[in-house]
Amino acid sequence: MAENEELKAAVFRVLHQPPRDHAINRTSWIMRDLRTVLSRQGFPVSHQVLRQIIRGAGWKWRKARIVLTSTDPEYRKKLSMVQKILANLASDEAFFQLMSLAR
């Protein structure tokens, strides 16, 4: 089961989204919530298989020391723009972003 490529893709697709996008009132994932969301999407999976998939990809569960969240309604759009820029950088180009921390 841990070798199932469709399941692996679903696991990392969910992990790359904040729990809030799945009606979970948290800022970071916990295993129980991840399993619940995957089950809703048609991927019932055990804790053990989920751990194998995550560790097999070189990921580790760690407790966050600082939580960065955004309440910006345009967050997804802005993130998508940054990811597009990064994906299309040439080897002799660099990405530099200025942002204001003041509100």
Image (cartoon, helix red, strand yellow):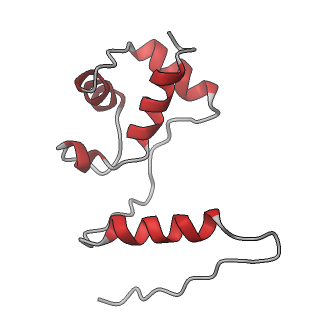
Residue sitting at x 65%, y 67%? 88
Residue 31 image point, x, y percent: 36, 28
Where is 24 relative to 102, above or below? above
Residue 66 image point, x, y percent: 43, 60
Q: Quadrant of residue 69?
A: bottom left
- In front here: 62 or 89? 89
Residue sitting at x 47%, y 86%? 99
Residue 51 image point, x, y percent: 50, 21
Residue sitting at x 35%, y 90%? 102
Residue 36 image point, x, y percent: 25, 25
* Left or right: 72 in relation to 1: left
Where is 89 relative to 50, above or below? below
Quadrant containing the C terminus is bottom left
Where is 3 relative to 63, above or below? above
Residue sitting at x 23%, y 71%? 73
Where is 17 relative to 92, above or below? above
Q: Quadrant of residue 55?
A: top right
